[in-house]
Image: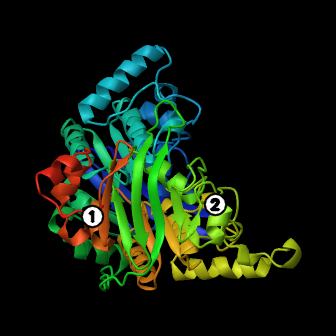
């Protein structure tokens, strides 16, 4: 019998108002790709943090290579040969990529050597990144690549991946899986958390299913279907989306000739952006992370007010240089790509975070309706099945998927006339993803104009009426989603829509 690389025995972790892990046991063999599957708030991330030394268990024992260990911090975990890629990134914004990676490595290595190794590893695994770029200039997808490269550079014996592909393109996922299979073949064990059931079935040899902090089963995912895995995880199959033909209304959002110079030397300038979104439709924007999507959404939401007059109209009003408050007054709401920091203030409660975009919670004279705010937050928690300690729970205390559900619910519940959404189902489980997509379709059917930026092509094809692609700061013509193909959209992601249109291979709209 092979000695397990990692063995957890009776792990329990309690927080005020919630038991994150209860008597959890888990065994991982060398060279095994082992999935941990569960809905948002099932306790997966807490369990991984215990293994990595970021969280101390209240009860239970950890064995590594058959020997009891007490992992007090991530440094001790890395010395044992355990590396982790977190769902929420642990990077210093003011440092470069190379400096961030260097912090977790042997300091006897010169920084220039670290940069060289980053370039070599990035090239080897197809994770394109520049070592000298400051982290604050990176998109979420690029930050994910930094985290993965940093973990791989330590040559781990156990690699923990928490939602590693949530912002990667299908092509990048395929390249990553080649790498992970190579690592497993060399004897490295992989603990893999993902809500993407196809990924788990394609990569993993074993799967531990969790629900409510407890282990509820172990299966070989290669012998399961997506439906059976869904039933194990959430007790049912995700609901089917009810989709009706779009009933188009007036033009709600018009962008015409939007040019914006990049604000940092490594950013992407927006060039000649132009499109419309009508009431009663969902327009999806696909593209590889880092091609100007963040800059576009900042310009549309009012975070960036450098647009020239006449470039952005909300209904009949020129809002090119209006701030977020006025645009929200006119009916535009937005869900940013970055959940913690932009979508929610980490150290504020969920009730307080509700105030960020809901002015109806402020009474005469500026007095807050405290009970009303808490009731509003509680209603969102219940409707979107957010697992947390209630309206007073801090935003940073929620799992990534649960925070995403709350932020999406907050903006959808505001009954916007126009909704901008970046990565709507990033990190949420299959049941919650289906609910969020269903709510977006309901908004569209109620006459809302919805613009969705997503790197999940399946998601865009599922909910969009029209599709566009962003590449190198430019945007493609739109194409009806029913007439688009994954292959065509993949070609357009390289900026080749002009060539495709000349070849007569698409039904595009200006």
Question: Marks 1 and 2, how far apart in space?
Answer: 29 Å
Q: Outermost residue, right direction?
A: 365
Instruction: Residue 321 in the image: state x and y as whole percent.
Output: 62, 54
Answer with left or right where residue 400 lies relative to residue 500: right
Q: Residue at x 48, y 58 (%)?
A: 11
Crowd class of label 2 (few under 14; some 14 to 19; many from 20; radius 10 Å): many
Structure colour scheme = rainbow
- Horizontal side of residue 503 vs 473, given as left or right: left
Find residue 324 and name its label.
2
441 is higher (above) or lower (below) than 277:
below
Image point (51%, 67%), residue name: 402
- Looking at the image, which is closer to me, 413 or 28? 413
Q: Quick check: can you spot residue 41?
A: no
Residue shown at the point (38%, 29%) measured from the top left: 154
Q: Which mark is residue 509?
A: 1
Could you say whether the residue bearing mark 1 is in a helix, strand or loop?
loop
Of the residues tagged 1 and 2, which is closer to the observer? 1
- Disc tally is 2
Quadrant location of the C terminus in the rendered image: bottom left
Q: Nearest the camera: 63 or 263?
A: 263
Cβ atoms under marks 1 and 2 closer than 8 Å: no
Question: Observer-nearest residue: 422 or 88?
Answer: 422
Q: Look at the numbered disc 2 and give the secondary structure of its residue.
A: helix
Q: Residue 386, labelled with which disc?
A: none
| First in residue order: circle 1 vs circle 2 | 2
Residue 186 % position (x, y): 20, 35
Locate residue 78, reporting x and y percent: 45, 34
- Residue 202 lies in what quarter of the image? bottom left
Q: Local crowd at mark 1 within 10 Å, few (<14), some, or many (≥20)?
A: few
Expressed as whole percent of the image width and height from the top left, the position of residue 50 reads 50, 50
């Amino acid at each position: 019998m092979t000695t397990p690389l990692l063995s957890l025995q009776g792990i329990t972790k309690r927080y005020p108002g919630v038991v994150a892990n209860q008597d959890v046991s888990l065994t991982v063999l060398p060279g095994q790709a082992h999935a941990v599957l569960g809905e948002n708030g099932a306790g997966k991330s807490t369990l991984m943090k215990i293994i990595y030394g970021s969280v101390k268990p209240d009860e239970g024992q950890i064995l590594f290579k058959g020997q009891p260990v007490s992992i007090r911090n991530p440094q001790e975990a890395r010395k044992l040969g355990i590396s982790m890629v977190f769902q929420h990134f642990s990077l210093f914004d003011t440092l470069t990529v190379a400096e961030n990676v260097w912090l977790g490595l042997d300091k006897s290595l010169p920084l220039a050597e670290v940069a060289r190794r980053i370039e070599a590893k990035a090239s080897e695994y197809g994770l394109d990144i520049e070592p000298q770029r400051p982290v604050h200039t990176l998109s979420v997808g690029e930050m994910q690549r930094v985290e993965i490269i940093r973990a791989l550079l330590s040559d781990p014996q156990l690699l923990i991946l928490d939602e590693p592909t949530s912002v990667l393109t299908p092509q990048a996922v395929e390249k990553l899986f080649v790498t992970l299979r190579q690592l497993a073949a060399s004897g490295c064990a992989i603990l893999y958390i993902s809500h993407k059931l196809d990924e788990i079935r394609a990569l993993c040899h074993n799967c531990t299913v969790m629900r409510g902090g407890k282990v509820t089963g172990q299966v070989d995912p290669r012998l399961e279907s997506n439906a059976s895995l869904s039933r194990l995880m959430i007790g049912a199959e995700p609901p089917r989306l009810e989709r009706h033909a779009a009933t188009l209304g007036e033009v709600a959002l018009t962008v015409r000739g939007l040019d914006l110079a990049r604000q940092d030397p490594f950013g992407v300038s927006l060039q000649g952006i132009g499109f419309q979104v009508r009431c009663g439709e969902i327009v999806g924007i696909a593209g590889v992370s880092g091609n100007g999507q963040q800059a576009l959404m900042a310009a549309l939401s009012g975070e960036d007010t450098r647009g020239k007059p006449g470039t952005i109209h909300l209904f009949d009003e020129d809002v090119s240089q209006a701030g977020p408050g006025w645009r929200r007054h006119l009916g535009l709401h937005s869900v940013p790509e970055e959940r913690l920091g932009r979508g929610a203030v980490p150290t504020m409660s969920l009730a307080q975070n509700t105030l960020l975009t809901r002015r109806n919670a402020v009474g005469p004279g500026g007095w807050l309706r405290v009970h009303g705010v808490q009731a509003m937050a509680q209603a969102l928690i219940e409707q979107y099945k957010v697992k947390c300690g209630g309206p007073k729970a801090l935003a940073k205390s929620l799992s990534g998927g649960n925070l995403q559900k709350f932020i999406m619910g907050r903006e959808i519940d505001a009954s916007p006339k126009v909704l901008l959404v970046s990565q709507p189902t990033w990190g949420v489980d299959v049941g919650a993803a289906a609910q969020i997509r269903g709510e977006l379709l309901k908004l569209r059917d109620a006459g809302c104009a919805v613009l969705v930026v997503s790197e999940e092509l399946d998601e865009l094809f599922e909910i969009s009426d029209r599709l566009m692609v962003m590449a190198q700061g430019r945007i493609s013509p739109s194409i009806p989603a029913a007439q688009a193909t994954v292959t065509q959209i993949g070609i357009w992601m390289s900026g080749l829509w002009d060539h495709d249109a000349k070849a007569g291979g698409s039904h595009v709209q200006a």
